[in-house]
Image (cartoon, grey):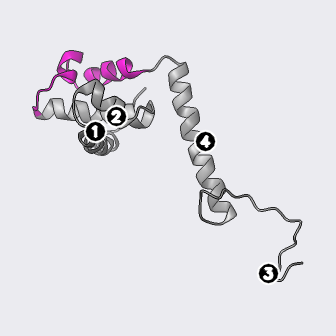
Amino acid sequence: MSAAGLNLKQFIKGDERILGDSDFVINVLNAANEQLKEKYALKAGGYDFNYAIQRVSSILNMTPNEVMSGNKSPKTVQARALLCFWGHRKLGLTTIELSEKIGVCQSAVSRLSRKGEKMAYETNFEFI
């Protein structure tokens, strides 16, 4: 045993990029792995940005063109918020990619994504 009371042959799971004890590190890595698996499963299933546009338009009873318009009506803003949230969190698109696709600045995508996340959870909207 070492001075710290640990057997030197005992290995502790860790990752130098994540501060915390072994259990915390394992939980963080498992959560990240689950998110990665979900993103790849969605891509493999053919779910892409165009699907997200169609899904948002069907949920909010809008046309895809209305969702992608630069209109600042409350319904369009809600649609774009949901689109940014699903595009960023579910599909793994960067905020830069989303800003280019919908024609707003990167910081607007971040704000819209947070707004879309809140909306999705409050209304129980599901991506699939």
Q: Based on the picture, tell me whether residue 79 belongs to the magenta stretch.
A: no
> Visible in this render: residue 85?
yes
Q: CA distance from mark 4 to mark 3?
A: 32 Å
| Residue 89, above or below 128 | below
Q: Secondary structure at mark 1?
A: helix
Label 3 vs 1, first from the N-terminus: 3
Residue 119 placed where, x, y %?
Answer: 28, 41
Chain part drawn in magenta: 48-73
Q: Is most of the magenta stretch helix, strand or loop?
A: helix
Tell me the kind of residue under disc 2: Ile
Task: Read off the residue under disc 1.
Answer: 106
Name which residue lies at 23% across and 36% down: 105
Residue 76 lies in quadrant: top left
Q: CA distance from mark 1 to mark 2?
A: 6 Å
Task: Read off the residue under disc 2.
Answer: 96
Q: Is residue 2 shown left or right of residue 12?
A: right
